[in-house]
Image: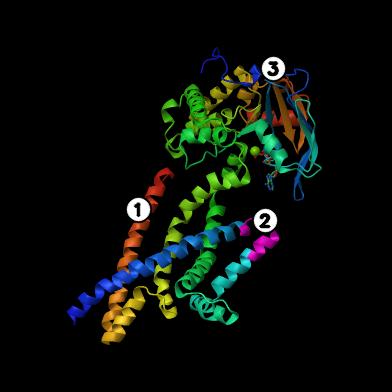
């Protein structure tokens, strides 16, 4: 075992995670959630056109590989004159992807809030949108934390695909050192270990968040 | 809450035109698909009056009550407040009309429907602060006063799931009162409660009636209806079969259907 190589490469790989993987996943997740909320609201709007657009969007995102979506944005768009740098390309592709997956989670969470909560909001005089914002979404958020946390953790791992469009992130750092040293097994296992560490920390954070949100729920 | 306390901002304080009823409903019809649930209901409610709606399951009591708060929109019929212009349900009902109806009335639900992510106090001030734009400090002061009156002052910072069923329902009543509505609507407010908790809720409702609040109450508690209501409506099959003062309707009902219904409730084993 080449302990020196491990010691030398560990920090650059972690740094690739902290400076590349996590910001990429975090930014895409936040934008993706905003898209997802919009799509979910279109789906439950009762308006056939909006609902149809939402359904089509979800179908396309879920029915095509993430890698293909990434390549369409980075390699495909330049051929119609739209050149986007690697980082923003990755953010666009991952955001759109999260938007498709999280939309169904958010929609299900909104529908899981009992109808009586809407009616209670209305009887105290609130409009639909205010009831949604103040009464329904906070309760839906509680329900959707576990599945959305899983979406985020998956996203952190999926961002390794961005190495294929030359984004500097965790896996690309490992690849570079592997190519340079020819220690492929060692470096890729090391990358796996760092991903695992990141995901374990995130899963712990998920637990803490769920416990906090549990305060007002009866058991 | 004692009966001699002055009413807290209760509707009887406002000068009113005694001639016109607070609420007049005419010919309300409502169907769910093929199911004709309301088949022409007429209803008047005067200020300070307590109207009880009784009748068998599925007779349309809840649907009628919910129509008064725009939680259901009837297919046809009219509704007018204080002798004002009538809302005609045969025409499309605007959002502003729903808002106006909800401004008038407040509903106390069978299953309280408190906001589980909000404390008791936050539940009560939500409407006043968010909708009526009452300054927060003022809304809190009033909420604390109302909570004290139903014996829940020390529960202001509790979450709904930390309360008993009777306490939850009393908070539900306070949440409605805090809106200072012209009309309080109750849909079987005690039927989801354990029997020993029913009394605490009914006694709060009786005190509200004594204070002069205008109330429409769907109930199976005939003793309560008899003691508190000014008028009782017996619904069956989507129509008002019989209406009258409780003393008359409960002791000598004119209609055979009313007699049978009362008999079934009073002597369930016969
Ligand atoms: N949203 C709805 N969709 C379809 N049918 C409904 C709906 N609400 C009520 N109904 C039907 O309308 C009829 C009357 O219901 P309603 O709840 O008004 O009766 P009720 O007199 O309150 O009965 P209960 O004493 O059981 O509460 C019932 O047959 C019920 O199944
Ligand atoms: Mg009912």
B59 magenta-colored: no
Judging from the image, what secondary structure is the residue with disc 1 in?
A: helix
Q: Which mark is residue A46?
A: 2
Q: Chain of mark 3?
A: B
- B70 with respect to A12 (left or right): right
Same chain, labels 2 and 1? yes
Q: Are marks 2 and 3 in contact (CB under 8 Å)?
A: no
Q: Quadrant of ligand 2?
A: top right
Residue B74 point in image, percent of width and height = 75, 41
Residue B19 point in image, percent of width and height = 78, 18
Q: Tell me the residue that label 1 is attached to.
A: A208
Does residue B131 appear anywhere in the picture? Answer: yes
Residue B253 point in image, percent of width and height = 75, 24
Q: Chain of mark 2?
A: A
Q: Which residues are magenta?
A: A42-53
- B178 with respect to B105 (left or right): left
Alpha-carbon span between mark 2 and mark 1: 36 Å
Q: Tell me the residue that label 3 is attached to.
A: B15
Q: Chain of mark 1?
A: A
Residue A107 point in image, percent of width and height = 56, 58
Does residue B193 appear anywhere in the picture? Answer: no
Alpha-carbon span between mark 2 and mark 3: 43 Å
């Amino acid at each position: 075992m080449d302990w020196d190589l491990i010691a030398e490469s560990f920090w650059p790989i972690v740094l690739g995670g902290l400076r590349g993987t996590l910001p990429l996943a975090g930014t895409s997740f936040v934008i993706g959630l905003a898209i997802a909320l919009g799509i979910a609201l279109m789906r439950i709007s009762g308006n056939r056109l909006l609902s149809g657009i939402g359904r089509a969007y979800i179908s396309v995102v879920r029915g095509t590989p993430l890698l293909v979506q990434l390549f369409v944005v980075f390699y495909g768009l330049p051929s119609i004159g739209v050149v986007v740098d690697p980082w923003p390309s990755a953010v666009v592709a991952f955001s759109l992807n999260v938007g498709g997956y999280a939309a169904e989670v958010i929609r299900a969470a909104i529908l899981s809030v009992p109808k009586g909560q809407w009616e209670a909001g209305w009887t105290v005089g609130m409009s639909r949108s205010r009831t949604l914002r103040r009464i329904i979404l906070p309760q839906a958020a509680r329900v959707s934390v576990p599945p959305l946390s899983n979406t985020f953790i998956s996203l952190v791992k999926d961002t390794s695909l961005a190495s294929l469009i030359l984004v500097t992130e965790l896996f690309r750092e490992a690849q570079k050192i592997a190519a340079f040293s020819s220690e492929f097994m060692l470096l890729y296992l090391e990358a796996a270990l760092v991903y695992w560490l990141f995901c374990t920390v995130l899963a712990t954070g998920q637990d803490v968040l769920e416990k906090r949100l549990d305060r007002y729920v009866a058991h | 809450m004692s009966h001699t306390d002055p009413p807290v901002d209760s509707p009887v304080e406002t000068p009113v035109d005694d001639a016109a009823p607070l609420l007049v409903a005419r010919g309300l019809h409502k169907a769910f698909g093929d199911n004709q649930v309301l088949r022409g209901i007429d209803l008047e409610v005067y200020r300070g009056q307590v109207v009880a709606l009784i009748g068998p399951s599925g007779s349309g009591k809840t649907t009628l009550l919910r129509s008064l708060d725009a939680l259901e929109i009837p297919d046809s019929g009219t509704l007018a407040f204080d002798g004002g212009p009538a809302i005609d349900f045969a025409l499309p009902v605007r959002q502003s009309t729903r808002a106006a109806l909800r401004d008038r009335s407040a509903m106390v639900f069978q299953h309280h429907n408190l906001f589980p992510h909000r404390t008791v106090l936050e539940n009560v001030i939500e409407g006043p602060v968010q909708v009526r734009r009452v300054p927060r400090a003022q809304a809190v002061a009033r909420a604390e006063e109302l909570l004290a009156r139903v014996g829940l002052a020390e529960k202001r910072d509790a979450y709904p799931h930390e309360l008993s069923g009777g306490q939850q329902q009393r908070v539900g009543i306070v949440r409605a009162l805090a809106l200072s509505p012209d009309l309080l609507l109750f849909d079987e407010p005690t039927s989801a409660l354990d029997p020993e908790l029913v009394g605490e809720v009914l006694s709060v409702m009786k005190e509200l009636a004594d204070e002069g609040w205008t109330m429409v109450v769907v109930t199976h508690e005939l003793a309560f209806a008899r003691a508190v209501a000014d008028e009782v409506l017996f619904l069956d099959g989507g129509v008002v079969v019989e209406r009258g003062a409780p003393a008359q309707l409960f002791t000598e009902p004119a209609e055979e259907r009313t007699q049978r219904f009362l008999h079934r409730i009073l002597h369930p084993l016969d």
